[in-house]
Amino acid sequence: MTFPLDHLNAATTPFYYYDLHLLDATLQEVREASAYPGFHVHYAVKANSNPEILKRIAASGLGADTVSIGEIHAAVSAGFPAPKIVFAGVGKTDAEIRTAIEIGIGCLNAESEAELDAIEEIAASAGKQAPVALRVNPEIDAHTHHYITTGLAENKFGIAMSMLGKLIDRCVKSEWIDFRGLHFHIGSQITDLTPYKILCERILEIEAQYPDVEFPTLNVGGGLGIDYDDPDAHPIPDFRSYFKLFHDNLPLRPGQQLHFELGRAIVGQCGTLITRVIYVKEGVGKKFIILDGGMTALIRPALYQAHHKIQNLTAAATASVADSDVGTRRGASTATPAASTATPAASTNPMVTYDVVGPICESSDTFGTDERLPETHRGDLIALRSAGAYGEVMSSGYNCRPLPPALFSR
Ligand SMILES: *Cc1c(COP(=O)(O)O)cnc(C)c1O
């Protein structure tokens, strides 16, 4: 990814910068890699609900996966047709369920018997059948961080395997429920595909367990991970292997539809948090880079001990100016307009070890410890990469800080 420094330097930091070309290329790859019969991809709106991003994803033809009425409204405004929107979440309120049914949502993914009670009651009073799938907790360890593992017995999500039979029976018999099938979501930032293979086996076991029940739709959720360590090496996740795994391991019944709900894998790499260095502080045996954007702009490091690749864009641009000077002196005819673009690679500045921190009054407001960066100065622009998913959406106004705005590549 390259960064248009002149454009970025003119903006007030911190802000999110979205590379829409990368988003489009990612969506194109999703379309091509998922082109198997019966496959449908939904975008998990909670990863990034920026209206510009949503519009682009809706225009590409994907459906939407939502977890609140606010997300449903955002999806509808962005152009997702209601039948292509699914609605998940352990705590849907009556008002949310009613609106979802009224607008003709594609599916409610129900997570408990109590929720089925509410859905039936509301559907009956609206005089309209509710499309319902049951979210199953398949009890699979996705080998991921415990905060973002959702498919284990101890998690709050989904219906336990032991209770499933009873609830399937209830849905099938209900006058007010149009039973759509089964829903799963085993976790997030899954980079080894093995848990998905186990999921396929588990789904086939469940289907075999209920031979008389029709499951028109199977929804395998999302969770495909991205490369946070080296975003430029893997700007687009390996969608081919991901979709092929399901095609190879989950044979569909005639007419059966397979749904996916990808969030991070679609938007993660196209977003970057751009911040500016306020101070370089000399500590005791340590140097700190203090940024003007912290955990209120990007909370993942504080919340999940996540790490985003940190790059000094100003130092990178200086380095590329030096490179192109050399090129000019050698008589190269195509010297790039390097001063205005930073391709963060090796800089000519000496490398220094820093702790990179935000300005918020919390010790967890740290983006990196012992980071090796080119020598950094007050005023430099710093990029926190791979921040397109669970970045801007999770920003807060803590410390009365304004929410970071969004800039887009042209
Ligand atoms: C969060 C979530 C997703 C998307 O997860 P990613 O890891 O961003 O792909 C999909 N489905 C459900 C039900 C979710 O809660």
Image: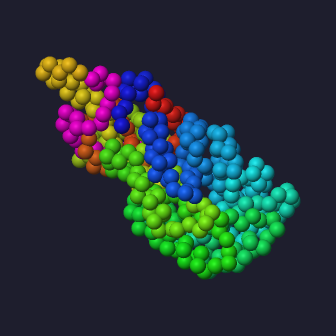
In this view, the residue in front, 185 or 174, is 174
Q: How many marks?
A: 0
Q: Position of residue 410 (x, y in %)?
A: 46, 27
In the image, what residue occupies the spot 47% across and 68% down?
249
187 drawn magenta: no
Q: Quadrant of the N terminus?
A: top left
Q: Is residue 284 left or right of residue 245?
A: left
Q: Left or right: 140 with respect to 234?
A: right
Residue 314 visible in this rendered orientation of the protein:
no
> Image quadrant of residue 87?
bottom right
158 relative to 282, above or below:
below
Residue 177 on image: x %, y %: 77, 65
Q: Which image quadrant is residue 167 in?
A: bottom right
Asked if residue 341 is among those painted magenta in the image, a careful observer would answer: yes
Which residues make up the magenta segment?
336-361
Coordinates of residue 119 in the picture (x, y in percent) = 77, 63
Q: 149 or 186: which is nearer to us?
A: 186
Residue 103 in view: yes
Which of 8 and 375 lies nearest the eye of the viewer? 8
Give the farthest residue toward the left: 330
Residue drawn 64% across the image and 79% down it:
211
The residue under the point 85% across, 62% down is: 124
Q: How is the image coloured?
A: rainbow
Residue at horizontal 38 percent and vertical 45 percent from the top? 235
Residue lying farthest to the front in this orientation: 254
Q: Position of residue 329 (x, y in %)?
A: 14, 19
